[in-house]
Amino acid sequence: MGAERNDSLDRGEPTDHRDSTARALRSDGSGRTRVAVDLNADLGEGAPDADAPLYPLLTSANVACGFHAGDGATMRAACVAASAHSVTIGAHVSYLDREGFGRRAIALPSGALVESLRAQCASLRAVAEQAGVALSSLKPHGALYHDAAVSPALARDLAELTRELLGPGAALVGPPQCALRDAARDAGVPYLREGFADRGYAADGALLPRSAEGALLSAPATAVAQARALWATGAIDTLCVHGDNPAAVPLLRALRAAFP
């Protein structure tokens, strides 16, 4: 189940990534370890009680930094909960768009956008340090995720911020084939190719628009089948379930059973 696949961190350099997120190591009870799929979720978006049952099912969490959702209190709650369950933490940065939940593209001069991203990372890093944990990754949210996938300049800014603010071994997370992957390689930053267990895909491999029928998956069997198909391609390093999906808990339970 992917035990031999470490081509994922395909800049060909050190594979630290805080030791665990790219390939989650699990004991099989015999003194050996085996490689399991990384399951991540976007959390800290304003509902700590709803997030709480997700942490035991995850290996990594992308924590909202206040620009599309969340605040200092939710960041602290996420860091503490993640630490308690040995879940690695990443910065989930976005455009400043709380009204639109970060799903609208915001036109900003490059310098202003970089400073806003820097502020988000710094805020979460400070909270994480107080909780005694390090940030292991950076994942853009919503419209920023999609824009950076096709904009070499924006992708380069995100890769350089990952290296500068999160340190050696921290990874950039994004789609399998896109400008983000190229920028991470050029910057010497680990890159995690992400697939979505709870989002529908079009025939060309693009995510369905959220307004389209079938855009959000809620049936565990359907999500598991999609996750297995994605993982079997060898082109995915981490599988995401959205924390705001009402079916997130049953989906993650089914995925954890399918990918123990």
Image: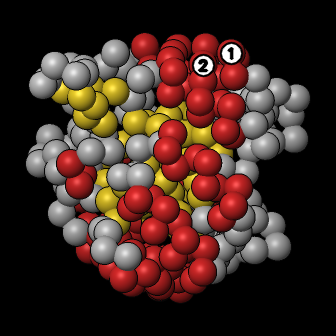
**228 vs 83, nearest the viewer:** 83
Mark 2 is surrounded, within 10 Å at the Cα level, by few (under 14), some (14 to 19) or many (20 or more) other residues, namely many
Please state the horizontal and vertical placement of residue 149, each as a whole percent of the image: 51, 49
What residue is rendered at 12% in x and 46% in y? 13
Residue bearing the label numbered 2: 224
Please state the horizontal and vertical placement of residue 237, each as a whole percent of the image: 38, 33
Q: CA distance from mark 2 to mark 1?
A: 5 Å
Q: Is residue 210 left or right of residue 256?
A: right
Can you tell which mark lies on residue 26?
A: none
Can you tell which mark lies on residue 221?
A: 1
Residue type indicated by callout 2: Val
Q: Quick one: SS at disc 2?
A: helix
What residue is rendered at 68% in x and 31% in y? 250
Quick one: quadrant of the N terminus?
top left
Residue at the outermost front position:
29
Residue type indicated by callout 1: Ala
Q: Is residue 94 above or below residue 238?
A: below
Please state the horizontal and vertical placement of residue 65, each as a whole percent of the image: 55, 74
Q: Is residue 13 left or right of residue 251?
A: left
Figure disc tally = 2
**13 vs 217, nearest the viewer:** 217
What residue is rendered at 27% in x and 59% in y? 170
